[in-house]
Amino acid sequence: MSRIYLDHNATSPAPQSVIDAVSHAMSVVGNASAQHGHGRSAASLIADAREAVGMAMGQCAQDVLFTGSGTEALNTAIHSAVMSGCQHLLISSLDHPATIMAAEASGARVTMLPATTSGQTNMDALAAILKGWDTGEGRPFLSLVAANSETGVIQDTDRAIDLMQDAGGLTLIDAVQALGKLPMAYPADYVAVAAHKIGGPQGVGALYVSPDAPFTSLLHGGGQERRRRAGTLNTAGIAGFGAAVADIDTRYAGLSELRDALQTALIDIDPEIVVFGTREDRLPNTLFVSAPGLRAMTAMMNFDLAGISVSTGTACSSGKVGESRALRAMGRIQDAKDGAIRISFGPGNTMNDVQAVAKVWATLRRKDREAA
């Protein structure tokens, strides 16, 4: 039985073009920092990938540095802001744990921006904080995820960036989930992305740093990445990242049709179902749902037994399953007392997959009712 993969927000499988690019790069001998011919061959692969990734991000390639993950990119931006004198960090309560935990560990004061019940970061709260800003705490710094990884709700990055620019502050946009699914070119000071969310290799990320933004290296050692990120570059992984962005516009198109069809099917099966984020624009591939009495972990295991991979939310905590951070921020935990299931589509998924999920859901709910 072939399995159905519906956890693309965690990691999207690599297409053959990425596998080929990584394989080719592995056959290229030389360290990209070396000045001889072999080194220049490796450096050429990285330069080509940087151009491709920069274009996909809507940013100048020379301002993009490669990292070992999206987490490292986010940590680097926060470290740079704090080292430049930012003593008060404004972090969206809908942000990824990598941002929240990095801010909490930075030594700076942290204010968590509240979220609305529909899944938006509260921009009025941000405006109020900036209006009463204590200049003794340095420039304001904001971290805002472009789209929440669980609900898929797209955040108001335009207003946030405008507010921060008017206040003379710094803005970090976590675009890890947005790359390939949303228009890019955020006019922010820092923008973070990761390869594996779009079918690139795991363990590769990138950070855009505006020429006017402060920067302090997180890692110390060699002079790689124009002395901004020490460490031998992952040539094969970076080459795979470049290949992954080459056709993302086509690979991630049409996913909203699958999401909407599944949403309709689940509501028809189970009118008590709760679908989160429907009052806002969402990522075209993401559906986050719960149902009274349906334990998320039990549901995920039943889907797995049926050959369907879904998740209970953010999959970046060593398999730990717990309360949804997003739903807690939204004040919606009571709507998902037993957890919620995230279904995230990607390249290769079809309407047949939608039907398969609906069939398993119907079976689960029938068993729940019979047992009640």
Image (cartoon, helix red, strand yellow):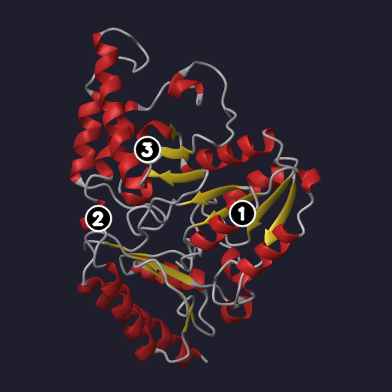
Residue 345 found in image quarter: bottom left
Choose mark 2 or mark 3, whichever is in front.
3
Q: Secondary structure at mark 2?
A: helix
Residue 308: percent from left, percent from top: 32, 66
Q: Residue at x 57, y 32 (%)?
A: 215
For marks 2 and 3 on the same chain, the one whose residue lies earlier in the sequence: 3
Which quadrant is home to the N terminus?
A: bottom left
Above or below, comparing residue 306 to residue 174 in the picture: below
According to the picture, the residue beneath numbered tag 1 turns out to be 166
Q: CA distance from mark 1 to mark 2?
A: 33 Å
The circle drawn on residue 321 is none
* 236 vs 272, nearest the viewer: 236
Q: Secondary structure at mark 1?
A: helix
Q: CB atoms at circles 2 and 3 under 8 Å apart?
A: no
Q: Residue at x 32, y 54 (%)?
A: 180
Q: CA distance from mark 2 to mark 3?
A: 19 Å
According to the picture, the residue beneath numbered tag 2 turns out to be 249
According to the picture, the residue beneath numbered tag 3 turns out to be 60
Left or right of residue 19, residue 225 in this image = right
For marks 1 and 2 on the same chain, the one whose residue lies earlier in the sequence: 1
Q: CB atoms at circles 1 and 2 under 8 Å apart?
A: no
Q: Residue at x 64, y 55 (%)?
A: 91
Left or right of residue 66, residue 372 in this image = right
Residue lying at the far front in this picture: please name it.
Answer: 166
Residue 304: percent from left, percent from top: 37, 65
Q: Residue at x 21, y 49 (%)?
A: 247
Res 280 visible: yes
Above or below, comparing residue 225 to residue 108 in the picture: above
Left or right of residue 339, residue 140 in this image = right
Choose mark 1 or mark 2, whichever is in front.
1
Amino acid at dot 1: Asp
